[in-house]
Amino acid sequence: MNDSDLDFAEPAPAEPGEVGLVAPQDYTSDEPFTFDCGRTIPGYTIRYETYGRLNRTGDNAILVCHALSGDHHCAGFHDLTDRKTGWWNNIIGPGKALDTNRYFVLCSNVIGGCQGSTGPLSIDPTTGKAYGINFPIVSIGDMVRAQERWLRAIGVTQLQGVIGGSMGGMQVLEWGITFPPFVRKLLAMATTAREGAQAIAFNEVGRQAILQDPDWQEGNYAAGAGPRVGLAIARMMAHITYLSDASMARKFGRRTVADRPHPSVPESNHAFDVQFEVESYLRYQGKSFINRFDANSYLYITRALDQFDLAERAGSLEAAFAPVTAESLVVGFTSDWLFPPAQNRAIVTALLRAGKGASYAELETDLGHDSFLLESPQLYDLVRDFLAS
């Protein structure tokens, strides 16, 4: 299929625009869903958002896959009073790299998540209570298979591309392997075909912060309750891995809260109250996270990250990529020490050895793992050119 086969809602504007107000939607399947762990649930719900318009043939769609702490809301506003846009608003919209005048862009909250899709917070119809820790163990493959059923149900016949960073990049790779005829292009960023020991270790520290919180209660806490302290600590620790030493030094250095023109933190004589700006920032990250994320979902999703290992599953990474038919682009970032450039390059090397069309780009940045989420004209050009080629 070439560009002339796509429906265009309107000519692309000279300057990039915004998607504006958006509303989440729910897809519910009443068909049983069997997880890779072997357990089955009687049905599931996927919460999602769309931007742009699906063409008559249903093949101008681009799926955005979110990272660990993300969700379906990746562009626009839900309400005029919203202070923040969706988490990838800088790349999605009319005339942007993911051009909604040209493509039908979609993003869903993963199964196992806590923002509307079926997960540990959901009610188990067999008991009438929340699944909690009795929810089936979730894999990256489960996330992708649940997405595929949803996309076909709403009329998508083929994906022009699948794009995502970090855990989203893992989903991108899984899409290319599991549903090769359904996707034309794979664009993975700041990702890995399997985590190293250090990444697993960070995830385990976060899980232990949750599991050792007395309010975890073996995963059977009430809605709105639970291990808030443990989850906040897990988020604080994980957030450090998304940054870099250079970016933290530039943003915070050794500045103290007392250096602020109008300190928002009252002075205290307690030696362990907030003193440094970086402490204040991390505490804010922890507090804001517990108001939007579920601790059990955090446990499940981090375990899914740890267990993702394409080479082990197929015998080698080259063998894992044997089914892939899509053209692939993998983007690494020089300051990413969570999933460093070498892990991203290894994906492309294996794709090429498997005889697949693949390319690699490495962007010089000092912003760390989260570089793919931040303003980057160079990245936007890469995305735009790869999808249009």
Image (cartoon, rainbow, N blue to C red):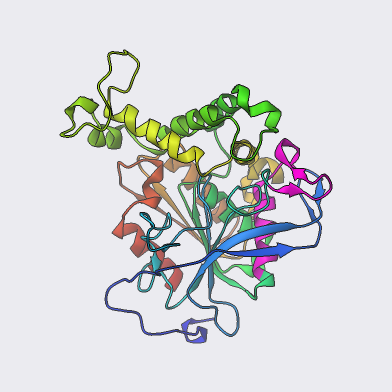
Residue drawn at x 57%, y 65% as measured from the top left: 326
Looking at the image, the residue that sits furthest to the right is 126
* Residue 332 in the image: above or below residue 231: below
Which x, y percent locates residue 291? Answer: 50, 41
State which quarter of the image contains the C terminus: bottom left
Q: Is residue 360 magenta?
A: no
Q: Is residue 11 left or right of residue 150?
A: left
Is any atom of residue 322 visible in this view?
no
* Residue 252 in the image: above or below residue 323: above
The boundaries of the magenta stretch are 122-151
Residue drawn at x 25%, y 37% as measured from the top left: 251
In this view of the protein, which residue sits in the foreground, 305 or 69?
A: 69
Q: Is residue 133 magenta?
A: yes
Is any atom of residue 3 visible in this view?
yes
* Residue 170 in the image: above or below residue 10: above
Q: Is residue 356 left or right of residue 289?
A: right
* Residue 365 in the image: above or below residue 3: above
Which x, y percent locates residue 128? Answer: 79, 46
Residue drawn at x 57%, y 60% as measured from the top left: 356
State which quarter of the image contains the N terminus: bottom right
Residue drawn at x 30%, y 41% as measured from the top left: 366
Which x, y percent locates residue 141? Answer: 68, 51
Which x, y percent locates residue 287? Answer: 44, 35
Quadrant of residue 283 in the image? Answer: top left
